Amino acid sequence: MGRPKLCVALDADLSEVQRLLDLLRDYPLIYKVGYKLFVPFGPAVLEKIRGRAPSSELFLDLKLHDIPNTVKNGVEGAAALGVNYLTVHALGGREMLEAAAAAKGPLKLLGVTLLTSHGPDYPNFLKSRLTKEGLVLRLAEEALRAGCDGLVCSAEEVSLLKRELGDFLAVVPGIRPAGAEAGDQKRVATPEEALERGADVLVVGRPILRAEDPRRVVEGILKLMGY
Ligand code: C5P
């Protein structure tokens, strides 16, 4: 998969995001846009990021989960915006995943397995007899078989998934440098742990957004990746 990449989750107000983009303009980063920015500002926010950070990549984290035709429409729309990465929930099922993969064009489609905010009790909520690991493996298999380029998974499962399913683009949130607060994330790992276990993209939000010196955090993680 080549050199790992760092993805900054832009879950912040527009003014804060603008400050951050200016601060981090020298670094090779992926910027992740989710509900916080895309719902109120739409595609205009992507243009804004492209304007301030032209060499960065864009990750639209909409985690689509709906009937196949509706998801196909969403994927086509995202592809037309020229984003590099887009998420769909693997829980949406085989037909939905195949419809998404057929519409993705050049963007990298990522299947979300289980959110990093879910702990080991989540299979009970789903009334699944599988363990958390079993459920993640099952969702991962479906997503890759349907044509997803990669998976969003926690650092807890990335090595198991690569062992069982071979190499894929492993996008790992729930990253907390030593000493950072977990917040609502239940399954967290340090950048070192996640990279050791096979993460290809580290997704980091609050530890960068809330840092006194975001550049220092970004530089520290990029250094671990060999930049
Ligand atoms: O602030 P924090 O580092 O926890 O941000 C993690 C980001 O990754 C958030 O934007 C969250 O929506 C996203 N994410 C996640 N777990 C997933 C998929 C995406 O935390 N399974």
Image: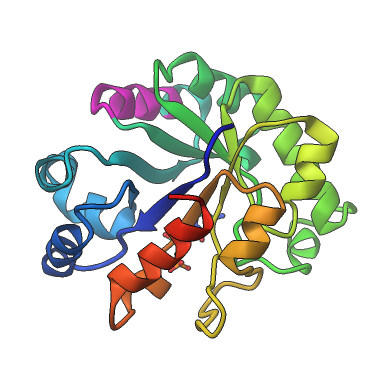
Q: Position of residue 30 (x, y in %)?
A: 35, 46
Quadrant of the drawing holding the N terminus? top right
Is 112 above or below relative to 114?
Answer: above
Regarding residue 121, the answer to whether it shows in the image is: yes
- Residue 171: horizontal and vertical position, in percent? 55, 46
- Residue 173 lies in quadrant: bottom right
Q: Residue at image x 73%, y 59%?
A: 156
Residue at (42, 36) in percent of width and height: 86
Q: In the rendered image of this protein, does residue 163 appear above or below residue 226?
A: above
Q: Residue at x 54, y 72 (%)?
A: 176
176 left or right of 37?
right
Instruction: Tell me what residue is drawn at x 22 percent, y 52 percent.
Output: 26
Q: Is residue 200 left or right of residue 70?
A: right
Q: Position of residue 197 (x, y in %)?
A: 72, 53
The residue segment tinted magenta is 71-82
Q: Dominant secondary structure of the magenta stretch?
A: helix
166 or 43: nearer the eye?
166
The answer to whether residue 72 is magenta is yes
Asked whether 29 or 150 is in front, the reply is 29
